[in-house]
Amino acid sequence: MSTIPFDTTPVFIGGRWHAGDSGQTLPLMNPSDGSVLAHIARGNAADIDAAVRAAQSALDGAWGALSATERGRLLMKMSALVLEQADELARLEALDVGKPLKQGRADAVALARYLEFYGGAADKVMGETIPFANGYTALTLREPHGVTGHIVPWNYPMQIIGRSVGAALAMGNACVLKPAEEACLTALAFARIGHAAGLPAGALNVVPGLGEEAGAALSSHPGVRHISFTGSVPVGALIQAAAAKNAVPVTLELGGKSPQIVFADADLDAALPFLVNAGIQNAGQTCSAASRILIERAIYDSVVQRMAERYRALRVGPAMDDPDVGPVISARQRELVQGYLSLVRDGALPIAAQAALPASLPAGGYYVPPTLVAQVPQGHRIEQEEIFGPVQAVIPFEGEAEALAIANGTAFGLVAGVWTRDGGRQMRMARKLQCGQVFVNNYGAGGGIELPFGGVKHSGHGREKGFEALYGFSTLKTIALKHD
Ligand code: NAD
């Protein structure tokens, strides 16, 4: 407990720290050793109601009165504070999520960049004038929805807060943020940063708590006018159903089973680090993880061998030691991943490589060995289901048509990567892949804050990141003025 620089138990509503209505707390675990790190408030429906009211008051008061430029400047100020505190934020994320320090620092830098990007964009969202009937002037305006709800998961709290709350604030919405019960320290730190930067009271409210309590209360609250949800497919469906009762739009960023497709003419030296890193980063708990690696048969053996060498060199350890791979988030997540590894063994699928778990790992930590599974047949559960752990499936293919059939053959459609030097094939593949983002000869574009992101099929709908997010976090009003 002593390592946390502030009291974690309150909720942040209307610019003030409150004890929370229930007076109850939830334990927050340190995934690296299984110890209790802190206790967080168990926010409930009454807290959510108070937060929504505070947000509405902010819209009716000081927050709603700011110009777009003034909102943008506040976000820029928050960005500078995040950068100043990047090391501390990385440390919180290491303790809370089990995220290696350098990955946590990269997330803090990404959060700062989101705030900078959306701060700069706040006064650049324009409407249109429309050539209409004589005697009229017709135009469109982009207006905030009002109170927006943000329900985020535990895997990338800072990045997801940056892309959703950052864009929503830029458009003039007032936000109620419900972080995940497994990891919410950087969400609380974000509330402090907003307050220190001078965000008017109520513009940003943070209520930690359980999904089925605080989360469900937020998604069904009649005062909320837009919901941004990042998380699992089943909970996404619940959120959409709750929002439908209030006729409220939702952005759903759900899971994925994203492929990287490697053709025989690819620059393998360039591809290799991306093939492995995109599978094991954050212990594989990344919605856009490249959990399937499709390799053209002519180079299949040599690529698997080179990936295996990298796997064997991976260092697994506690997050504060800044390893290549830290623990997964919880004992439950470790069990889920171990269940998939049992499927691999039961199906006698060849394990091309498995990183060793050092004997010195803390006994209570939630570690699983990063595992590269070869020759995975299309349709196998390892090939179809999101594992959310450091396990990659390698699948051989022959030619573009088979690569596309495998790549598009899951329920998901979030991201895909294509490695080839053939210009025509690059664009043919990019056009035919069923997903929201395609990377050619790279994967992830270094975070791609400026690039619209989101899925098709079970990966969700709506887009966050980039300028596009500002349209999602606003509503269009048309004005037709008759003057003759
Ligand atoms: P989850 O759906 O269980 O939880 C996500 C959030 O929803 C948490 O804040 C949780 O408290 C809340 N929640 C849970 N039940 C709720 C309910 N009934 N009503 C309202 N809110 C509720 O997901 P998770 O296990 O925490 O996260 C892992 C999943 O998230 C994976 O499937 C992953 O792919 C997905 N994810 C997607 C993206 C993306 O951008 N597409 C990013 C990160 C994670």
Image (cartoon, rainbow, N blue to C red):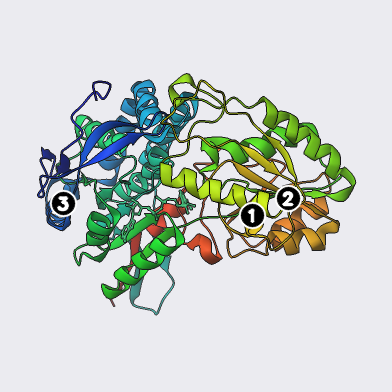
Q: What amino acid is labelled 2 in the image? A: Leu
Cα separation between marks 1 and 3 = 42 Å
Q: What amino acid is labelled 3 in the image? A: Ala
Residue bearing mark 2 = 349
Q: In the displayed structure, does residue 160 sit left or right of residue 306?
A: left
Across and down, in percent, residue 204 comes to 22, 45
Residue bearing mark 1 = 382
Are the residues flagged by discs 1 and 2 in contact, CB closer than 8 Å? Answer: yes
Q: Decide: is 78 above or below 339.
A: above
Cα separation between marks 1 and 2 = 10 Å
Q: Decide: is 115 above or below 411.
A: above
SS under mark 1? helix
> If you read the primary sequence from the N terminus, does the residue marked by circle 3 or circle 2 appear first?
3
Cα separation between marks 3 and 2 = 51 Å
> If you read the primary sequence from the N terminus, does the residue marked by circle 1 or circle 2 appear first?
2
Q: Quadrant of residue 299?
A: top right
Residue bearing mark 3 = 51
Q: Which residue shows up at 45% across the image and 34% down it?
A: 110
Q: In the displayed structure, does residue 200 sit left or right of residue 315?
A: left
Tell me if the residue at label 1 has its CB under 8 Å from ligand 1: no
> If you read the primary sequence from the N terminus, does the residue marked by circle 1 or circle 3 appear first?
3
Across and down, in percent, residue 464 comes to 45, 52
In this orientation, which residue lies closer to the viewer: 241 or 265?
Answer: 241
- Specify few, some or many for label 1: CA neighbours under 10 Å numbering under 14, 14-19, or 20 or more: many
Q: What amino acid is labelled 1 in the image? A: Ile
In this orientation, which residue lies closer to the viewer: 93 or 330?
Answer: 330
- Specify few, some or many for label 2: CA neighbours under 10 Å numbering under 14, 14-19, or 20 or more: some
Across and down, in percent, residue 226 comes to 30, 61
